[in-house]
Image (cartoon, rainbow, N blue to C red):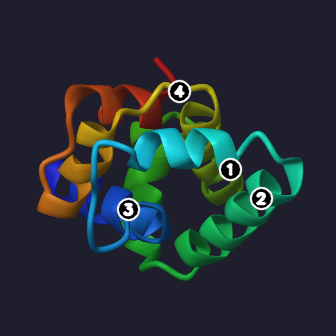
Amino acid sequence: MRAWVIALTCMSLAMVAGCATSDETAAIYHKSFQNPEHYNTYVKKCSNHVRAANIEKRRYMARLINVSLGEFPAVYCERFAKALRNGGMSSNDILSLNTGMPTPNVIRIARNQ
């Protein structure tokens, strides 16, 4: 179960996490996402990326975060974009995605808790 969470979370946030994470990464995204154009572009690209994922992974994740399969890509990406914009994700959270071990906070964000 956790492997699916990790895989899809990593996949959908790959464009955010990048290859290197520093102490400033979360602050950079926080500042960038104050611009509605940057925010909306991220949500759109992330949603397209998630929508292209394996259907079984999407079904599992949609059930996990309690949304319909059709709503899943947009809702999932919107939750992470909001967390980044509002400062709800730390650089450690972003780094945890690169290492394949999401923090409890990342799981809470995905589940909107």
Q: CA distance from mark 4 to mark 3?
A: 15 Å
Task: Pick whichever of labels 1 and 4 is earlier in the sequence.
Answer: 1
Task: Pick whichever of labels 3 and 2 is earlier in the sequence.
Answer: 3
Q: Residue furthest right?
A: 37
Task: Pick whichever of labels 1 and 2 is earlier in the sequence.
Answer: 1
Query: Disc 2 designates what residue?
Result: 38
Q: Is residue 78 left or right of residue 25?
A: right
Local SS, label 1: helix
Where does the image place residue 30, in percent across and percent down from the top left? Answer: 59, 39
Q: What residue lies at 48% left-to-right and 71% top-to-bottom?
A: 15
Mark 4 surroundings within 10 Å by alpha-carbon count, few (fewer than 14), some (14 through 19), many (20 or more): some
Query: Disc 3 designates what residue?
Result: 17
Local SS, label 2: helix
Query: Disc 4 designates what residue?
Result: 87
Q: CA distance from mark 3 to mark 2?
A: 15 Å
- Seen in the picture, residue 71 relative to 83 is either above or below; the reply is below
Residue type, numbered disc 4: Gly
Q: CA distance from mark 1 to mark 2?
A: 6 Å
In this rendering, the label closer to the viewer, 1 or 2: 1
Residue type, numbered disc 3: Ala
Q: What residue lies at 26% left-to-right and 67% top-to-bottom?
A: 20
Q: CA distance from mark 2 to mark 4?
A: 15 Å
Query: Disc 1 designates what residue?
Result: 32
Q: Is residue 47 left or right of residue 13?
A: right
Where does the image place residue 6, in percent across and percent down from the top left? Answer: 23, 56
Rendering quarter of residue 107: top left
Camera sees residue 1: no
